[in-house]
Every structure is written in C-alpha cells, then in structure tokens.
Image (cartoon, rainbow, N blue to C red):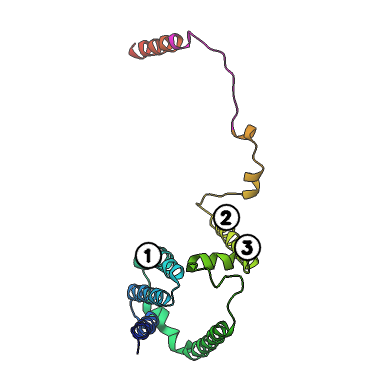
Amino acid sequence: MEFISVLFYVFSTILICAAFCVITARNPVHAALFLVLSFFSAAALWMILQAEFLAIVLVLVYVGAVMVLFLFVVMMLDINIEKIRAGFWNHFPLASVISVIIVLEMIMVLLRGFWTPVDPLLDKDEMVSNTKALGILIFTRYSYAFEIAAAILLLGIVAAVALTLRRRKDTKHFDPAMAVKVNSRDRVRIVRMRAEANSTTTISKNVSTSIRQDEK
C-alpha cells in the first residue's frame, strides 16, 4: 500500500469519527471543536486529491471565520442541552434514512464525475494549476451558475439587512425606499442670519443686571 493511500485512510477515519462526535457530544463547545477537527481532516483529503484551492478555502473560511463565530456564540449562550436532546432518538430513524439517501446521491455524483472524459476546454499539453483550472471552468462552462449563485447571495444579504432593520420596539428602523428617495436638499438646510456685533455685550449686560437684582 502506498503512503498516500495510508494518509487517505487515516484522515478519512479521523473525519468520520469527528463527524460522529459532533452529533453525539453532550457539550456544545466540544461539538464545535470536533467540527473544527472534521474540517481540518477534510482539508487534508482535498490536499491529497491536489485540490489546494478548496483545502485553503475550507480552512480559512469555515475554520477561521464561521466556526470561530459559532464557538463564540455557543459559549456566550446558555443552552439547555437536556431539553434539546430530549427528542433525539425519536427522530433518529428518519434521520438515518435521509443520511443513507444523501450518501447514495453523493456516490452517484462522484462516480459520474469519474466516468466523464477530460474537459476539452483545458489543454492537455499546458500545465495549469488547480486554481487556474477552477477559474477557467467557473467563467466558461459554469458562468451562468456562478452568476445565479452570486445573485442568490446578494438577495440573502438584502433580506438579512431588511429583517434586522425592520420596525420593532426599541430598535433603529430603516426604510430602504425612503433612503433611495433622499435628496441632498433634504439633508442639509442653509439658514442665513444677520451678524450682530453687539449681541455678546447685550447678553453680558442682561446677565449682570439679573445678578444684581437677585442680590438685592
């Protein structure tokens, strides 16, 4: 057995065990840490398959940003674990069936990917990196899918902002329609006033007169 195969089986075993511990751990912080371990193991498998870009994205985006945020949220919230795990075994049979279906679908997709020929868009004689090959595929064959995914993400951002700044009690309200209709003349109004040189002297005289009246 080759050394690459040994590494594949080692990281695959760690990934499966860590994923199982994510759903069986009693402490949510431990579950989040096991999920970080599973992400690192998956990134190692991507490196073995020479998919460096996907491995780096998995580590930087999910482990470096998403999972750190999850970990802080879980540590700050007071979660009742017993109440959440009360109906775990009641839903376990349905969850097992759905998991088997998902695994079968992934096997079918992967086997179909192994059976398809090499992409004719890539020149066989030209040695390109994995990131460059991925960029060529995204902006040629999958350009429409890439644009649709970008539009869906933009829609999600707009929806998140709209839900966060909706009209609620004790919160700041923001109306996007009114913000679009805003004119520069509505924001700033210039008021012209006459310059009064003796205004300060008059105020000081009035103050001193009032003080004297109070003393009397």
Quadrant into which the N terminus falls: bottom left
**Between tags 2 and 3, which lies in front?**
3
Which kind of residue does numbered mark 3 sit on?
Glu
In percent of width and height, residue 191 lies at: 59, 22
Q: Secondary structure at mark 2?
A: loop
- Residue span colored magenta: 188-201
Q: Quadrant of residue 57?
A: bottom left
Tell me which residue sits at (46%, 70%) in the image: 54
Decide if residue 127 is on the left or right side of residue 116. left
Residue 147 is tagged as: 3
Q: How many other residues sit within 10 Å of disc 1, few (<14), some (14-19) or many (≥20)?
A: some
Looking at the rendered structure, the kind of residue marked 2 is Arg
How far across and down, in percent of the image, does residue 47 sit?
Answer: 40, 74
Residue 4 in the image, given as x and y percentages of width and height: 36, 82
Residue matched to label 1: 68
Q: Is residue 199 magenta?
A: yes
Write down the residue under mark 2. 166
Q: Which comes before the other along the chain, label 3 or label 1?
A: 1
* Camera-nearest label, 3 or 1: 3
Answer above or below: position of 195 versus 74: above
Q: Quadrant of residue 7?
A: bottom left
Number of residues whose C-alpha sits closer than 10 Å to that of mark 2, classed few (under 14), some (14–19) or many (20 or more): some
